Image (cartoon, grey):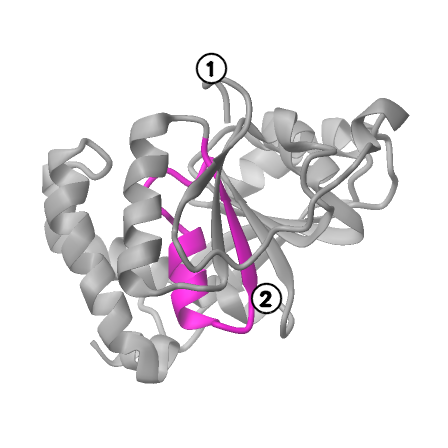
Amino acid sequence: MPAARTLFGARLPLATEYARRLATDGVVRGLIGPRETERIWDRHLVNCAAVAELIASEASTADVGSGAGLPGVVLAIARPDLSVALLEPLARRTAFLSEVVADLGLDNVEVVRVRAEDAVGKLAPVDVVTARAVAALDRLSAWCLPLAKVGGRLLALKGATAADEVAAHRDAVARLGGSEPVIRSCGQGLLPDPTTVVEVVRDRDLTPASKRERPERPGRSRSGRSRSGSRPRRGA
């Protein structure tokens, strides 16, 4: 696929191996639906990789509700200059992510088993927070904006509902310290269906002081081990 060669460059073999893992272990372990195997490249990998055009060089990134690693693992493959923390509360998913990170040698990635709302104060604020198919924009902003630096951004991968979500939740986003949401289109001229992203800048810090204690900078884990947070509960 020409788009994949452009987006991944010399790291296309890593992306190919990740695609294979999604189509095999990812399906067996319930992270990817069986019907998605034929669409892994166009619907998932290049769709996520296109978002890299919105992220500055050497940015720190947190991927909320990472699941099978979309878009976090994809961005880490396409952009080795980024430091990426994959935040996921479910043990079976963090196990898969840790195996993928270790097997692909992604030393710019850390897997953290934690809910997004419990990560505030445990991780240092990042430049960019990403999320794909996690929640509506109001809830997503509540979980993700506190993880970003003031001036940092939430990049929420959305589909056809993006404009409706912005209209419905712009007031909630403002109350949560976010800017006016802006809809971006990534991969124009490269992808037949460009990726739709809602971008929100964190304008203000509304995080309680108790949540700001002893933050830890997302590291570069060469082992692929997950770092446990709180016990997994239903959430982001």
Q: From the viewer's side, name the closer residue of 82 and 108.
A: 108
Rendered location of residue 233, percent (x, y): 47, 15
Q: Earlier in the sequence, mark 1 or mark 2?
A: 2
One can see residue 138 in this view: no
Q: Quadrant of residue 191?
A: bottom left
Rendered location of residue 164, percent (x, y): 55, 35
Determine which of the numbered discs, if any, sits on residue 233 in the image. 1
Q: Quadrant of residue 179?
A: top right
- Amino acid type at circle 1 is Arg
Instruction: Tell me which segment is drawn in magenta.
Output: 65-88
Q: Is residue 205 left or right of residue 102?
A: right
Identify the element where label 1 is drawn.
loop
Q: Is residue 88 left or right of residue 83?
A: left
One can see residue 76 in this view: yes
Q: Is residue 76 left or right of residue 100?
A: right
Identify the element where label 2 is drawn.
helix
Rendered location of residue 104, percent (x, y): 29, 63
Determine which of the numbered discs, if any, sits on residue 54 in the image. 2
- Amino acid type at circle 2 is Leu
Q: Is residue 171 left or right of residue 41?
A: right
Residue depicted at x 20% and y 58%: 19
Q: Is disc 1 surrounded by few (<14), some (14 to 19) or many (20+) residues within 10 Å?
A: few
Q: Is residue 79 magenta?
A: yes
